[in-house]
Amino acid sequence: MKKSLVQKKKERALMKILIPAVIAAAVIGIGVFTLLLLNRQELTLTVDGESHYTVEYGEQFEVPEASAFFRHTILPIKRNVEVKTDSSYDPEKLGTYTIRYLAEYKGLSDERTVTVQLVDTKPPVITLQSDPDQKNGVNTEYQEEGFTSVDNYDGDITDQVERAFSAGESPDGKTPESTIITYTVRDSSGNETSVTREVIYTDMPPEITLLGGSEITLEVFTPYEEPGYTAQDDTDGDLTEKVTASGLPDTGIPGDYEILYSVTDSLGQSAESSRTVLVRDTTPPEITLVTNSPYTKPGTVYQEEGYSAFDNVDGDLTALVEREEHPEQIIYRVADQSGNTAEAVREIIYRDVVPPQLTLGGEVRMYLPVGTPYTEPGYSAVDDVDGDITDRVQISGGVDPNAEGIYTLTYSVADQEGNTAAASREVFMYRPQQQTATENPGSKTVYLTFDDGPGPYTEQLLAILDEFNVKATFFVTNQFPPYQGLIGEAARRGHTVAVHTLSHRYEVIYASEEAFWNDFNQMNAIIEAQTGQKADLLRFPGGTSNEVSKNYCAGIMTALSQSADRMGIRYCDWNVVSGDADGGQSPASTIAQNVINGIQAHDVSIVLQHDIWPNSVAAVREILSWGLANGYTFLPITGSTPLVHQAVQN
């Protein structure tokens, strides 16, 4: 640059000498040639700043500016020329970059270069996080509180941090030595950073954990059941068994109760926890209305039937019940001390629901010999609202005085509200039996009687009796219809046939007096069909003294024995038991011996056997053989036989 300026001055001086000479000599051509010969063209490119830069990543770098101009060395001609820049510089990527500058004009060119090196020399930063509430107990594993690492170029490199553990020193000489944790990280440029954390261990107090929560609500009177708890210590481990609980709630009294749980470890560290038990009474009182009748008689004022109120905690609250009366209902309200309320409503319904009172005059069971006209003894009916309504009584049924049977007359009446009452009267039309004077048969007289047949063994029994030319008495049933013909056969052979029962079902025949006589009449009709005449002799199933009939109708045996007497029907029990009522399990020899022993205790013996059991039938031959050999007489029951009556128990 300095050399060009000197030349310029010389040339100008020369021109000052030549120009006048040229002009003067008018040698124009020679002067022009000389100027052209001495003049030159130049292109100059200049870049600001240095030719090399080192830039730290993240710092601002501005690409250097450049300028270029074209000029003549003698002629006063000069102009600026455009500079072209070629740069791949990336501020986000480390490396070395070259910036090229180029200026071109009229075949002339000038070029410059600048190098830029983008580097990362800053180490990453590690930040340790700290939890002020974290305690590091003895014998517990350290729980990492957290850390982060950020590099100015690589960004978040927390996942590249490496931890190394080493032993420190005991801070007080008693607790275990501390732990030194060294956190190290290296970025992609090789910059490395390390920081350390010292973990100090202290003896922590035990920790009590309450199962089921720290607050429990119980209904009053509900037994408190401990939900449980645990206690852990960093030194002693599980201390659950050493926990003590105090202040158990009284669940019979509403209130708030606090249970205190406490425990101490071997180093004297203590812990406490508490559970609140809320005992509450949420059960409302109970109002009970006394209701003798759901209806109130029309035209009357409802009379309080009574009520009571009881609370599970406060007890009897009847005196606190408030009544609110309305035309068709009464509302009862009460509250206990816990504020629980109860309400009951009594609906008042005015209606006549009481049936009339229907009263029969005379006996409700009448016994009349056939041919005696029936005369109505009378009746009356009174209603609590309608008054005397005897004229409304309706009678259904009738009595045929000329035919045997049990006739039922039904009396019914209804008041204006539709309430009904009914009653019935039974009329027994019977044909009196011919009465025969009882004769004393003398001593050593035996009446063999057989119940429940005829059956499969009755024909064998008839043969044995024929063999000994002995007559007996059969109290027959219709339990085995195929053997019904043996009833007539027994009568034809001179045996006495009497009524026992048609069905032998106690629940049927002892359901009522009417049911019994219906059963009796049906069986007697079979006897009449087989023998040509009805029987006037009866043996009650189970005997007159049976108590099983109590299960079906109280007092029925008393009524039946009395009605039998009225109708002239004789009934007979027994005074010697064979012991065959065990379903035929006893052997024939035992049955025979039972009878033999029994008849020796009586002058006149009425023996009970059953011809439906083979062992009992087989025992007859031994009984007859022994009896006849010992001077006993065997007879059938007749109209003159003295009968045995057991004491009525129902």
Image (spheres, rainbow, N blue to C red):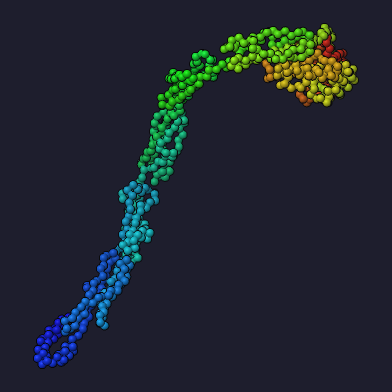
Residue 301 percent across, percent down from the top left:
49, 14
Q: Looking at this view, is 103 or 200 the one in front?
A: 103
Left or right side of 594 for 463: right
Quadrant of the image containing the N terminus: bottom left
Left or right placement of residue 512 versus residue 528 in this view:
left
Residue 577 can be seen in this image? no
Residue closest to the eye, 131 or 207:
131
When the figure is inspected, residue 346 is found, relative to residue 65, above or below; the finding is: above
Task: State how many labels appear.
Answer: 0
Residue 445's x, y, as percent? Answer: 84, 12
* Residue 16 in picture, x, y percent from top left: 10, 87
Residue 9 seen in the current view: yes
Nearer-the-camera pick, 237 or 430 = 430
Residue in the picture at 38% in, 42% down: 206
Question: Which of 634 and 383 lies nearest the eye of the viewer?
Answer: 383
Q: Quadrant of residue 526?
A: top right
Q: Image quadrant for the C terminus? A: top right
Residue name at image x 73 percent, y 19 percent: 509
The residue depicted at 83 percent of the width and 17 percent of the height is: 528
Q: Residue at x 36, y 42 (%)?
A: 269
Query: Residue 328 placed where, x, y %?
Result: 49, 19
- Residue 562, picture quadrant: top right
